[in-house]
Amino acid sequence: MADYEFLLRAGSGLKTAFLPMVTAEMQSGGASDSIAAIEETARVKRFTGKRHNLLVELERGRAALGFRLRQLFYRREPQA
């Protein structure tokens, strides 16, 4: 979440560029794919003041619902 907090704090003053190539391949799961990560993201948005609290709560609720639906419908096979 530190990277996300950095981006929110930098705001419109951050200079960015588009890189038209794949730089990393990732799989779902891990520490970033959890209810704790969703709550931390909401905390960062509130802390930096870059999002209205109502929007923060709506986004948090949508993310939590999506997380729960993924858990229900995309169960991973147990690893050997």
Image (tube, helix red, strand yellow):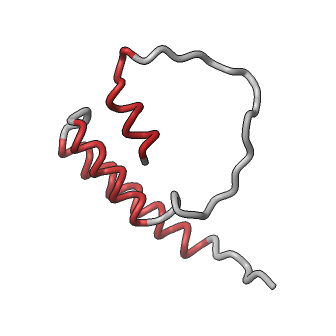
Q: Give the residue drawn at x 41%, y 31%.
A: 7
Residue drawn at x 63%, y 18% as measured from the top left:
18
39 is higher (above) or lower (below) than 17: below
For the point 75% across and 33% down, the residue is 22
Left or right of 43 on screen, residue 69: right
- Asked whether, in this view, residue 30 is left or right of residue 36, the answer is right
Query: Residue 31 placed where, x, y %?
Result: 53, 63
Q: Find residue 5 and report its image quarter.
A: top left
Residue 53 against residue 64 in the figure, above or below: above
Name which residue lies at 33% across and 49% down.
Answer: 59
Image coordinates for residue 47, horizontal then vertical, percent: 22, 43
For this rendering, which residue is in front, 76 or 73? 76
Please tell me how many numbered marks the rendered image carries: 0
> Which percent across, then down, holds residue 12?
36, 17
Q: Quadrant of the C terminus?
A: bottom right
What percent of the width, then of the height, locates residue 75?
A: 64, 76
